[in-house]
Amino acid sequence: MNPVQASKGAAIDLESISKAYGGFKALDGVSLRIEPGEFMTLLGPSGSGKTTTLNVIAGFTDVTSGKLLVGEKSVVGVPAHKRNIGVVFQHYALFPHMSVGRNVAYPLTLRGIDQATRQARVARALDMVKMGDFAHRYPSELSGGQQQRVALARAIVFDPPLLLMDEPLGALDKKLREWLQLEIKRIHRELGTTFVYVTHDQEEALVLSDRIAVFNRGRIEQVGTGRQLYDEPATLFVGRFIGDSTVLRGQARSDGNSTALSIAGETVTAPRRLAGEASPVMLLRPEKLSLCRPGQNAANGANRLSGTIAEAIYLGSESKYEVKLADGSGAIVRSALTGESFGLGDKVELCFDGTDAKLLADDSTADTTLT
Amino acid sequence: MEMKPLTRVLLGLVCLLVAIWLVAPTLVVVPMSFNENKSLAFPPQGFSWQWYENFATNPDWSNSFLNSLKVASIVAVLATVLGTLAAFGLDRMKARPANLLRMLMLTPMVVPGVVLAIGIYAVYLDTQLVGTLLGFVLAHTILALPFVLIAVSASLEVFDRRLETAAASLGAGALTTFRTVTLPLIAPGVASGMLFAFATSFDEIVVSLFITNPYLKTLPVQIFASITRDADPTVAAVGTILLFATTILIGGGMLLLGRERKGRQ
């Protein structure tokens, strides 16, 4: 397509959207602005409210309170079939009694588009998802990946300003999923439509999105680019949900501008303080940690914690170690193969620079909702 | 699992016996219809087409056959429309009231035909519906409705309602969705319900005996009257015609359905 179409997506505004089922709050004051043409991913564990949010935007679910604007116009109370929003479902939802061609033509027929135009647009949409040769097949003759590509063609053929995708790759195997992720990215670039994508897979979210909204318990914990969420998590939940992480908990003591945690007799410090009353924990990314033999000089960092190698995983380009610390908690370390290698049960010291430790408020619920 | 040869032979024998037992009464009718004498004796004597001729030319027979065809066709359409709508509505209702209503609508299947017949007859006497087309259609529709309800409900049970959500997202309102997505996918259930409804009406004798009069007789009423009055082998000829007609109809339907299913998979 040409670059003129690059701005034809619709903006979406969610303003304090709540949805209650009896006493249960599926959505609890969700506010989010999605820019025109943006690829926004709603990420979270199951039951966190991400799919409910998608259903609210699509018009499949009413809201209990709050405002919803699509393209700067309120759509509260507008039925789903009048919203002109494309939706791709995890279960494909192709009509089994129609051929691929008729499935894709369906939304055009409803809009009273004449046959010649219809055929041209169906062909273009199928070409875009590389299913041009399958127009006469029936859905039952296609593989899962092919069915989902047809479903995608059907959802974009009527040029909706907004496309919603609800875990569209959830039922597919890993290789196919990775390839289709790139296809979806390419189609997003070519169409310039606003995409809202729901997934519980943080890697998928990182691959696809311009920005990610992390959901937990019916609320948005943080919105940002993948890098922002990884480097500067706002909450312990976000830090743990995005990427691998090690969380250090201990007796906390803050003075001046630094925080010290005492963990099973050893003390680590970070040159920062947490605002507020909450008890602080330290979150560390695997690449910020290093391992050395007890007594050896560490490559980086003044902080040291003793532990034992509980798991050593060879990953080709690097090694991943799980270290059991003195207080029983676990740490995850990645190290290049050029360094020293360690075996199961080796006594090691975990070293890190205090400036690399993120100080976050402890949240015991972060553990329970992740598992 | 491998079977012993003896077991296999015994099993085959038992199956054959049961099959003969089930089909024999039906097949006995066929040779009787070609009897030369005016008797329902078995085995028949001689060969003639005269009872088939009698069926076609005697207005008592041909009229009652046409009446049955007319009543059964209207009943099939009416019961299918009402039954499909009822099944759809019950499918979308809360489980408890839906089950209650469903049971209520299935009662004509359980209540003894005579009880129903007496009730209908009493009402028809007052409303002057005895011996009328409308009377037959109304009474038979009550009896046929449960069959449609059961067949369509079974289809709706396996229908994936998420397809309706998908249709809505593509711009289809509730009616369009029903017409273009739901109905085509439950069509086999609707069709078999319609077939059952037609057969129920075409076959019905108990209620029909009560609400018939000399001006409007259905085929089963005529058969019953004929067999109680005299041993007319025309009954056997009618039976034979119906046997082949239903065999072709249902056999053809099954073939068509099978082919369509194969084409899709």
Image: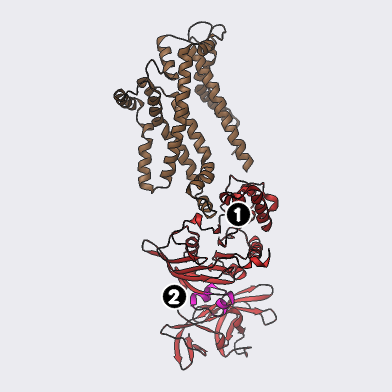
Q: Which kind of residue does numbered mark 2 sit on? A: Ser
- Whole-percent x, y for residue A315 in the image: 66, 72
- Whole-percent x, y for residue B91 in the image: 43, 45
Rendered image: mark on residue A364: 2
Start and end of the magenta stretch?
A223-243
Q: Which kind of residue does numbered mark 1 sit on? A: Arg
> Looking at the figure, which quarter contains the N terminus of chain B?
top right
- Whole-percent x, y for residue B209 in the image: 37, 20
> Which tint was used for chain A?
red
Question: Does residue A1 appear left or right of residue B143 in this picture?
Answer: right
Rendered image: mark on residue B186: none
SS category of the residue bearing label 2: loop
Determine the chain carrying the residue at label 1: A
Image point (51%, 35%), residue name: B191
Distance from the alpha carbon under mark 2 to that under mark 1: 44 Å
> Which tint was used for chain B?
brown
Closer to us: A136 or A226: A136
In the image, farthest residue toward the bottom: A256
Q: Is residue A241 magenta?
A: yes
Q: Which residue is mark 1?
A: A154
Mark nearer the viewer, 2 or 1: 1
Q: Earlier in the sequence, mark 2 or mark 1?
A: 1
Q: From this viewpoint, is residue A267 visible?
A: yes
Closer to us: A275 or B57: B57
Question: Does residue B186 appear left or right of residue A145 in this picture?
Answer: left
Q: Is residue B174 above or below residue B207?
A: below
Q: Is residue B189 magenta?
A: no
Residues indicated by labels 2 and 1 sit on the same polypeptide chain: yes
Image point (29%, 24%), residue name: B126
> Looking at the figure, which quarter contains the C terminus of chain B?
top right
